[in-house]
Every structure is written in C-alpha cells, then in structure tokens.
Amino acid sequence: MITFHHLLESPLFQMLTLKGGKEGLNHEISGINLIESVDISKFCRTNEIIVSTGIHLNGDTEALLELIIELVNKRTAGLIINIGPYIPKVPDEAITLANEFHFPIFQMEWRYRIADLLKVTFQFLNTHQDRKIEHEDLMRQILFTEFQDTSLDQALEQVGFTKEDEMSIILCSPYSKEIDLRPYMNTIQQEFSVRYKLFLRLVDQHHLIYLISRTHVLTPNIPFSKTVNAIYEKLMETFNNVPLSIGMGNFYREAKHLKKSLEEARTVTKLSQQHGNPNLYKYKEIGAYKIIMGVENKQLIQRFHRDMLGSLEKYDQIHHTNLKSFLRIFIEEDGSTSKISQREFIHRNTVLYKIKKIESLLDTDLNSPFAKTNLSIAFMIEDILSV
C-alpha cells in the first residue's frame, strides 16, 4: 500500500508542505485528480490525492471548507492546495478541519507546475504498483506452494526483512463467503500502517493476509489487541458493522514456517467466529484449544465429546429443540440465570426449566464445577472438530 509517508520520503515531492491532518498520513493513495469546485467533486474517487488551485472558489473560504468536507466524505486520500492568486494561503479553518478529520492538507507554491506534479505522481504510483505485484507473488510462493527453499528468505530480505526477524501472519477473515473485504481494506491498512513500518499484503479469496515482523513494530508498548479493537471501532463508525475477525499466528524466523503461522491464524479467526468472540486475537492465547489440538488420538476426544453431549444432540434431533445450544450459552454465562434470560430474551422460569431438562438428560448437576469443566471441554472439542 502506498501512503503519504512514502511520498514524503521521496525527494520527488519535496515541494509539498504539510499544513494539517498529520494523523491521516497513513491513508492509502491510488491516484491523483485535479478538482476545482464542489460541483465536480463527484468525479473524484476513493483514495485519490486531490489537487486544487481554487480558481473556481472565488476566494471564498466557506466554499473551500465545503470542498474539504466533501472530499472527506468521498474518502479521498488528501488535498494539495496550489497556493497563489486564487488561494494565497491555507486558511486556519481548513487546517482545523484537516486535523479534526485526520485529512492531510498540503500546500504547494505557485512556482511548481501542477502538470509536473501529476506526471511525477503517476510515475511514482506505477513504479510502486509493480512492486506491490511482486510482493503479492512472493506471498503466494511462501504460503501456497509446496516447494520451499532459502531463496524465499533471500527474497524477503530484498523487500526489507532480515534473517533475525521473527515473522507472523495476520489473517482478516470474513464471516461469510459472500462478504468482499476490499471495501474495508483501507481502514485495516491505516491501522496497520500506524503499528508496522513494513508489512506485505495479499488478497486471497476474499481473505486479507498480512506478513509482519516484530522488528518493524512502531508501537511496541501497545498490544496487538488495541490495534484490532481500533479497526473494529472504525469499521463500526464507517460501515455500521464488523464483517470480519482478525487473528495472528505464531512468530517464525524462516519463510518455510509461515504456512503454519497462516493455519494458526485461520484457527484463531474460526474459533472467534464460532464463539462470537471478537476478543480472540492470537494463536498463543487460545489456551486449552491447543492442548486438544495436540491430542493425536482423535477417536479419544470424539468419544469424550459423544459421552458428554451425545444424548443431548439425539434429543434435539428427535424433538427439534435447541438444548445443546442453550447449554453452551449456560456455560459461557457461568450459569447466571439473569444473564441467560437477557441474552436469550426468555423468562427466568424458562431458563430454569431448560436447565432442569438438561440435567435430567445428562444425568448431571450443572452447578458442579467438575461438570461445567467437562462440558466446556466437550464444546471446545466440538469447535476444534469443525475447524
């Protein structure tokens, strides 16, 4: 992903001076467009840099502010104002808006030609687009090809990783196959750009896959969970929903082990979705699930699951009830009648009736800590068997 950070690191763009919106420098840039009034702002696209001389604004600050708000709503990357006869300076009100909306506004002196800026930007984006394709090809080789050798480690070194780097895969997985995550990608990229100095990205079958390294973490004092929660919050603000779960696999030093990290990340996202628990982030944090997955005798854990829940499953099938699902909620809410009642929108007496029915079918006391532990393990086995 190309951001303003990349542009500002290049001597080609030394004519740009940032005036406001510093927090938005991690916005993705996909193109550049010349827009001179609110009326034609409908032609701009998401993630474009917008350039304006203000020739049609007639020196009206309110019109400029209206244009900025429209560009923010269009989710453009930022605005470059060519200061001169039409806009002699960037107004303070525009800088305030830029900071409020994290929308970068730059000024470029009149002596620099817009035609040159457009040409240089197009060339810069095309060069980096070719590099992006190379990075995606490298990710595919690492994660989806059988043959692995040291050439992949060497290729990672060429893009900025080192032999000492501990690398991991982060997977953004949709809640259903019908969900296309690309509209949400910009929000994710922005937060990852804040956290990681370097990362690679791959879009694969509606999943977003990121390769990151501990060495390139810019915010080591902030846990990964904070970054994930920031993404979820911004998705809710922008789209009113969170259509994905985010999971991280373990860290490895060699490219050949990153396939395993991907599978670990996939396990995290599936468990998160099964439990409706967006706060499950890392493979190393999934606890007892790892112990269950480490049991080689699969028949043993299948038999345990059947002994614990088999009679309940059979009753549900015959009577078209949902007692097993209710029991999972009972375990998750630690048997709290009031919490179960609120969660299921049912009367407290109905909760008590279902509890007694389950105790009768399973011939167990659900208040027993030992029974709760065994049933929790049985549900965890069920989760693992369905992954």
Image: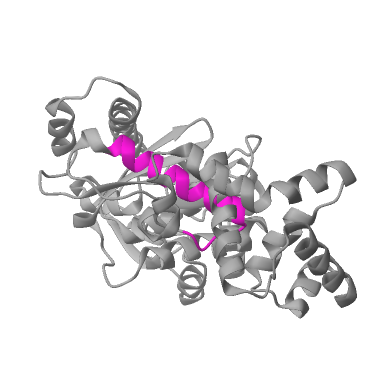
Residue shown at 86% from the left, 42% from the top: 318
Front-most of residues 281 and 33: 281
Number of callouts in the render? Answer: 0
Q: Quadrant of the N terminus?
A: top left
Q: Position of residue 34 (x, y in %)?
A: 49, 44
Q: Position of residue 321 (x, y in %)?
A: 85, 51
| Left or right: 334 as drawn, with respect to 221 | right
Residue shown at 82% from the left, 47% from the top: 316
Front-most of residues 57 and 52: 52
Q: Quadrant of residue 43?
A: top right
Asked if residue 278 is among those painted magenta in the image, a careful observer would answer yes
Residue 41 in view, yes or no? no
Front-most of residues 86 and 381: 381
Q: Which span is picked out in magenta?
A: 258-280
Front-most of residues 286 and 256: 286
Residue reaching furthest front? Answer: 363
Residue shown at 21% from the left, 48% from the top: 10
Using the image, determine if residue 241 lies above or below residue 202.
below
Residue shown at 46% from the left, 40% from the top: 208
Q: Quadrant of residue 200?
A: top left
Asked if residue 330 is among those painted magenta in the image, a careful observer would answer no
Q: Quadrant of residue 190?
A: bottom left
Q: Position of residue 269 (x, y in %)?
A: 50, 49
Residue 285 in view, yes or no? yes
Q: Position of residue 86 (x, y in %)?
A: 47, 59
| Left or right: 63 as drawn, with respect to 170 | right
Q: Describe the colour scheme in one phrase.
A: one colour
Q: Main secondary structure of the magenta part?
A: helix
Using the image, determine if residue 186 lies above or below residue 134.
below
